[in-house]
Image: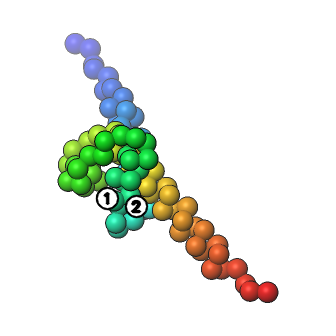
């Protein structure tokens, strides 16, 4: 009997989702639901319910479009925090 080779594609297939959730964990603001709804409105799409957004955030359900919106909101928050740090760290002349 031949030995079966384990296929590791499953791990690689979802690694981008883990990276997205790690980024969200680090940079998503505490009040993320409303900015996520606003993201969908800016894109001209029907926003999902607040419950669905929270369920995607908590990994209860999975939807790529909502995960992308959460990453975008987290990225906007990261940029805002960095800008605040930059502006407050400058010395007055």
Q: Earlier in the sequence, mark 1 or mark 2?
A: 2
- Is 92 positioned to the left or the right of 52 in the image? right
Question: Quadrant of the rendered structure where residue 11 is?
Answer: top left
Please provide percent x and percent y for residue 55: 22, 51
Q: Pick the quarter of the image with the C terminus.
A: bottom right
Q: Which residue is painted at 38% across and 53% down in the image? A: 38
Q: Secondary structure at mark 2?
A: loop
Q: Which residue is painted at 23% across and 50% down in the image? A: 49
Labels 1, 2: front one? 1
Q: Secondary structure at mark 1?
A: helix
Identify the disc placed on residue 33. Answer: 1
Q: Which residue is painted at 32% across and 32% down in the image? A: 10
Q: Which residue is painted at 65% across and 75% down in the image? A: 87
- Cα gap from disc 1 to disc 2, whole angstroms: 10 Å
User: Looking at the image, can residue 82 be seen?
Assistant: yes
Q: Which residue is mark 2?
A: 28
In the rendered image, the vertical position of residue 71 relative to residue 4, given as above or below? below
Which color scheme is applied?
A: rainbow
User: Looking at the image, can residue 20 be seen?
Assistant: no
Disc 2 crowd, CA 10 A, few/some/many (<14, 14-19, 20+): many
């Amino acid at each position: 009997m031949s030995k079966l080779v384990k296929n590791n594609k499953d791990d690689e297939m979802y690694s981008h989702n883990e990276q997205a959730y790690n980024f969200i964990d680090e940079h998503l603001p505490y009040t993320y639901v409303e900015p996520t709804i606003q993201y969908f409105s800016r894109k001209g799409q029907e926003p999902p319910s607040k419950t669905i957004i929270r369920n995607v955030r908590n990994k209860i359900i999975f939807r790529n479009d909502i995960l992308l919106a959460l990453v975008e909101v987290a990225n906007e928050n990261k940029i805002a925090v960095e800008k605040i740090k930059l502006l407050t760290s400058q010395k007055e002349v």
